[in-house]
Amino acid sequence: MQGASANRLFHEFPELKEKLWGGHLWSQSYCLLTTGQVSLDVPKKYVESQGEH
């Protein structure tokens, strides 16, 4: 999935390769987070608010 999406984006927007870390769209690492005992609405609101900055 990541390889296919990266290839398509680089094909449609070749300038992306120059703006990214060594021409790589996806990182080799991963992220795992937990929110504890909260409803899904709490982290969802937080993530949505990050676009406002």
Image: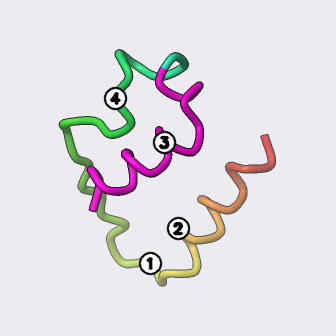
- Find the magenta span and give its range: 1-17
Q: Residues within 10 Å of mark 3 (few under 14, many from 20)?
A: few
Q: Mark 2–mark 3 contact, CB under 8 Å?
A: no
Query: Position of 4 compared to 16: left or right?
Result: left
> What amino acid is labelled 1 in the image?
Val
User: Which residue is the site of mark 2?
Assistant: 43
Give the foreground label among 1 and 4.
Answer: 4
Name the disc covering residue 2, or none. none
Q: Residue at x 48, y 84 (%)?
A: 39
Q: Position of residue 13 (x, y in %)?
A: 59, 38
Amino acid at dot 4: His
Q: CA distance from mark 4 to mark 2?
A: 28 Å
- Mark 4, residues whose alpha carbon is within 10 Å: few (<14), some, or many (≥20)? some
Alpha carbons under labels 2 and 3: distance apart: 34 Å
Residue located farthest toward the front when viewing the structure as drawn: 11
Residue 22 is drawn in which quadrant? top left
Label 3 sits on what residue type? His
Q: Would you name the residue on which mark 3 appears?
A: 11
Earlier residue among tags 1 and 4:
4
Name the mark on residue 38.
1
